Image (spheres, rainbow, N blue to C red):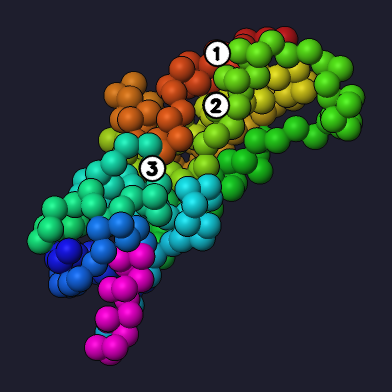
Amino acid sequence: MNFNVKVWRQKNAKAKGHFETYKIEDIESDASFLEMLDILNEKLIREGIDPISFDHDCREGICGACSLYIDGRAHGPDDHVTTCQLFMRHFKDGATITVEPWRSSGFPLIKDLVVNRGAFDQILQAGGFISVRTGSAQDANNILIPHDVAEESMDAAACVGCGACVATCKNGSAMLFVAARVSSLALLPQGRAEAKRRVQNMVKKMDELGFGNCTNTRACELECPKGVKISHIARLNREFLKANFSD
């Protein structure tokens, strides 16, 4: 398969960015999108051109590092996948593929397709954890949790923090990410002890870092690679209201 890859190039955060188009040929249909970028970079290096900078790590859809905006969609034209799980067979032979970084004031650009997603780490550090001792597995099993509640908590915890929700949202909102972290703990008895402080601190930090507000367009839910539901945003709002109106 042959493609024209129209990719955003920007030397650093202060430099003016622009699109460059590169032609690449003989790509296997079963190659992943990141493998295609690897092949393209090898070609650019041979031609004496600075390779394209992009984030990646596990390449198994677990870490969420492969944050690319492809043909107008976060992680590309497939549902519930990260970029490393996107295969070239999803594109037409001879197509021009447009590749951009996440566009959000909360994710400042570093170089080319690489953005600083450290804001998510700061939000987690503000309260996305429990500090109480939960004991061993045997002790934890003494606290009975209904199956449906445990499953809902695990669904929220499936969030990989890739930032697709922010990149997709017209407001640049991080509500789905924050909601997933708050909801996964709010549903469990181990997380209730610090529930008030957690939700207040995480929402405060999210606002401080310049993320927008949710207006319920559900774009985040559509593009989330793990299928996290916006019902968790409703729980986040309830937790926040309870925390601010409780004694």
Q: How far apart are marks 2 and 1 (CA)?
A: 18 Å
Q: Which amino acid does label 2 sit on?
A: Asp
Q: Earlier in the sequence, mark 3 or mark 1?
A: 3
In the picture shown, does residue 162 fall above or below 238? Answer: below
What residue does disc 1 label?
Answer: 238
In the picture shown, does residue 93 fall above or below 186? Answer: below
Q: Which amino acid does label 3 sit on?
A: Val
Residue 70 visible here: yes
Nearer to us in this view, 93 or 135: 93
10 Å neighbourhood of mark 3: few (<14), some, or many (≥20)?
some
Q: Which residue is drawn at 63% across and 32% down?
A: 201
What residue does disc 3 label?
Answer: 81
Magenta region: 35-48
Q: Which amino acid does label 1 sit on?
A: Arg
* Relative image position of residue 78 (x, y in whole percent): 29, 41
Q: Magenta span has 169?
A: no
Q: Residue at x 65, y 35 (%)?
A: 128
Residue 102 visible here: no
* Relative image position of residue 214 (x, y in whole percent): 38, 26
- Magenta part, dominant SS: helix
10 Å neighbourhood of mark 2: few (<14), some, or many (≥20)?
some
Q: In which quarter of the image is the N terminus?
A: bottom left
Nearer to us in this view, 162 or 80: 80
Left or right: 78 as drawn, with respect to 156: left
Q: Residue at x 41, y 58 (%)?
A: 115
Q: Which of marks 2 and 1 is nearer the N terminus?
A: 2
Callout 2: SS: helix
